[in-house]
């Protein structure tokens, strides 16, 4: 009985030390728990579909940006691009250069907010 208690204490101490000192240990535990969760709870098809929609939207915006925005594009051209994609944006001046920054808001599905899919939104 004493051996089991001692072994348990040693095991808990080792896990605690690894948790706080080894980054890859935390990742290993997370992915192990995620894999265990996914074997019991399948990811709903609509979650995968929503993720695919988001990926397609991002790729479309990247392609449109590549086709529309060239080096040296004027501020009005950049503003027109963001407006055509319905992306709110701001212009900042950094070290004498102008930088445009926009954020895409994409609402996820409430059913997909769990260990398998993570948060239900992305930006």
Image: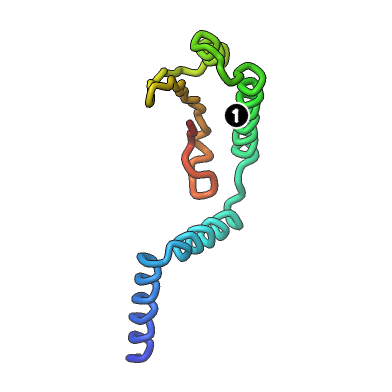
Q: Residue at x 56, y 17 (%)?
A: 72
Direction from residue 12 to residue 87 in the image, left or right = right
At mark 1, the secondary structure is helix
The residue lying toward the viewer, choosing from 20 and 93, is 93
Please tell me whether residue 43 is drawn above or below residue 123 in the rendered image.
below
Direction from residue 121 to residue 96 in the image, left or right = left
Please tell me whether residue 114 is drawn above or below residue 51 in the rendered image.
below
Give the residue at mark 1.
58
Image position, residue 117 (x, y; %): 53, 44
Q: Quadrant of the N terminus?
A: bottom left
Q: Residue at x 43, y 20 (%)?
A: 98
Image quarter for residue 3? Answer: bottom left
Q: Residue at x 47, y 25 (%)?
A: 103
Q: Residue at x 36, y 75 (%)?
A: 12
Image quarter for residue 9? Answer: bottom left
The residue lying toward the viewer, choosing from 109 and 13, is 13
Please tell me whether residue 2 is drawn above or below residue 69 in the rendered image.
below
Image quarter for residue 16? Answer: bottom left
Q: How is the image coloured?
A: rainbow
Direction from residue 26 to residue 117 in the image, left or right = right
Image position, residue 61 (x, y; %): 61, 24
Mark 1 is surrounded, within 10 Å at the Cα level, by few (under 14), some (14 to 19) or many (20 or more) other residues, namely: few
Q: How many marks?
A: 1
Image position, residue 89 (x, y; %): 45, 18
Direction from residue 122 to residue 47 in the image, left or right = right
């Amino acid at each position: 009985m004493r051996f089991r208690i001692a072994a348990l204490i040693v095991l808990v101490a080792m896990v605690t030390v690894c948790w706080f000192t080894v980054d890859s240990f935390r990742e290993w535990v997370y992915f192990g728990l995620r894999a265990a969760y996914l074997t019991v709870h399948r990811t709903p098809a609509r979650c995968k579909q929503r993720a695919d929609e988001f990926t397609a939207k991002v790729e479309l915006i990247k392609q449109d940006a590549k086709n529309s925005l060239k080096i040296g594009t004027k501020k009005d051209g950049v503003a027109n691009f963001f407006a055509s994609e319905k992306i709110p944006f701001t212009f900042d001046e950094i070290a004498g250069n102008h930088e445009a920054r926009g954020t895409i808001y994409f609402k996820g599905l409430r059913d997909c907010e769990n260990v398998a899919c993570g948060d239900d939104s992305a930006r």
